[in-house]
Amino acid sequence: MSSEFYENIYNIVRQIPSGHVATYGRIAALAGIPGHARQVGYALHALPDDSDVPWHRVINAKGEISIRSEPLFAHIQRQLLEAEGIRFNENGKIPLSKYRWIPDLN
DNA sequence: GCAGTGACTAGTA
DNA sequence: ATACTAGCCACTG
């Protein structure tokens, strides 16, 4: 494993409970690499399909789905989030103030 | 090793 | 409110 960043990131994302979301920047900070929000997205992109990481609960700071390549995934992501009870605004955005994940102190 | 890329963010206009 | 810019830094070719 050349990147232990990835495992840290995955570990954090797995802790996001259903019905909540977290931003890339927040994930990076929790993974111990504050400021590396882009690498979080990169790590999730490299995620295998059979992974147990809930990648769909990670969104950008604007509360919107950011996927640049593969617009199809954005559609799937929205369905997954709605299935967990997350409601989108008319803009197609998620109200972060309501669904933002606050990490437990374990 | 260098240049390009990107599932980002914060700032500026 | 939206659009563009700069900074950021690991990964890839």
Image (cartoon, coloured by chain):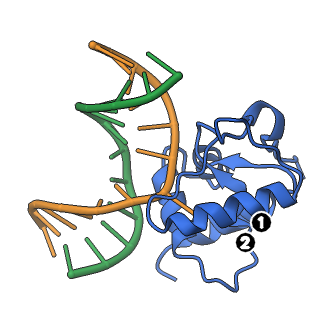
Chain colours: A blue, B orange, C green
Three-letter residue code for mark 2: Val
Q: Quadrant of residue C11?
A: bottom left
Placement of A52 over or under A37, stated as above or below: below
Inspect the image, locate mark 1, and give the three-letter code of the amino acid beneath it: Arg
Q: Nearer the viewer, residue C3 or B5?
A: C3
Q: Provide residue A77's location: percent of width, then percent of height.
A: 68, 62
- Residue A17 vertical placement versus A2 (above, below): above
Task: Where is residue A69? Give x, y as percent.
Answer: 44, 65
- Chain of the residue under label 2: A
Q: Please state if A104 lies on the left or on the right of A90 as rendered.
A: right
Q: Is residue A48 left or right of residue C10?
A: right
Q: Do residues under tags 1 and 2 come within 8 Å of each other at their CB atoms? A: yes
**In this orientation, does residue A15 appear?**
yes
A69 with respect to A16 (left or right):
left
Residue A19 in picture, x, y percent from top left: 87, 52
Do we see residue A12 in this rendering? no
Residue drawn at x 48%, y 68% as measured from the top left: A70
Q: Chain of mark 1?
A: A
Q: Quadrant of residue B13?
A: top left
SS for dot 1: helix
Residues at marks 1 and 2 on the same chain = yes
How far is mark 1 from mark 2, CA to CA? 5 Å
Residue drawn 78% across the image and 57% down it: A81
Q: Nearer the viewer, residue A27 or A77?
A: A77
Write the residue at 75% across / 49% down. A21
| Earlier sequence position, callout 1 versus callout 2 | 1
SS class of the residue under badge 2? Answer: loop
Query: Label 1 belongs to which residue?
Result: A14
For label 2, the residue is A53
Q: Nearer the viewer, residue A37 or A34?
A: A37
Rendering coords of residue A97 (x, y %): 77, 30
